[in-house]
Amino acid sequence: MTQLPVPTLETCKIRMTLAINMAKRSSCRQLKVGAVITCKNGEYHACAFNRPPEGREYCNKNNCPPGDIDGYCKRVEHAESIAIDNFYAKHKNISAGICFTNWFPCHHCFLELYRKNIRIFIYAYDDLNCPTSESECGKNTQLIHLYHRRHEYKEELSAVKSLTKEYGNVILAKYKNDLLVRE
């Protein structure tokens, strides 16, 4: 098994700041995600945020659909998927290697990125500061989605961790307070 190069904390801070700023551009009512894909040394990059496919309208409080059976929203393209496409469109002869996101990748995105040579996944998930019970959310759709997301977090992260073990030679790390902690 080859040793994976781990990006420096300065590179993590720069790329994570970009991913977090990209997430702010998203209009998704369920979860705002920004992603930055870089080459193995972090020099070349491409970024994106989750959004509906070209020509489709953005979700609003009246048309925000529930996810499919495993919570995967089909109305929005995931930031990681768009970012990897942008990376290879922009840097055709350079191999991608690292994915920075404000939220860990779902298992669908993990598999897609793994197939496209990403072996280091760094995310900055933080507590969502949402109500502790669904009844406290009232009729606020966004709060209800955040409440459910917070409770789904451990299950989805567990699935991604299982995939990293199964596929091997993968680093999944949390970046918080200028520290990089491997999962």
Image (tube, grey):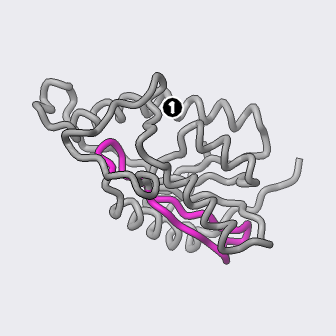
Look at the image and say whether residue 31 sits in the magenta stretch: yes
- Magenta residues span 28-49
Q: Is residue 147 left or right of residue 95?
A: left
Choose between 20 and 88: the one closer to the eye: 88
Look at the image and say whether residue 120 sits in the magenta stretch: no
Residue at 73%, 53% (x, y): give it.
116
Q: Residues within 10 Å of mark 1 (few under 14, many from 20)?
A: some
Residue 102, x across and y down, in percent: 45, 55
Residue 148, x across and y down, in percent: 32, 30
Q: Amino acid at mark 1?
A: Glu
Compared with 165, 3 (above or below) is: below
Compared with 61, 69 (above or below) is: above
Residue at 51%, 31% (x, y): give it.
156
Q: Is residue 65 left or right of residue 20?
A: left
Residue at 55%, 53% (x, y): give it.
80
- Image-quadrant location for residue 107: top right
Choose between 140 and 97: the one closer to the eye: 140
Residue at 71%, 47% (x, y): give it.
114
The residue under label 1 is 156
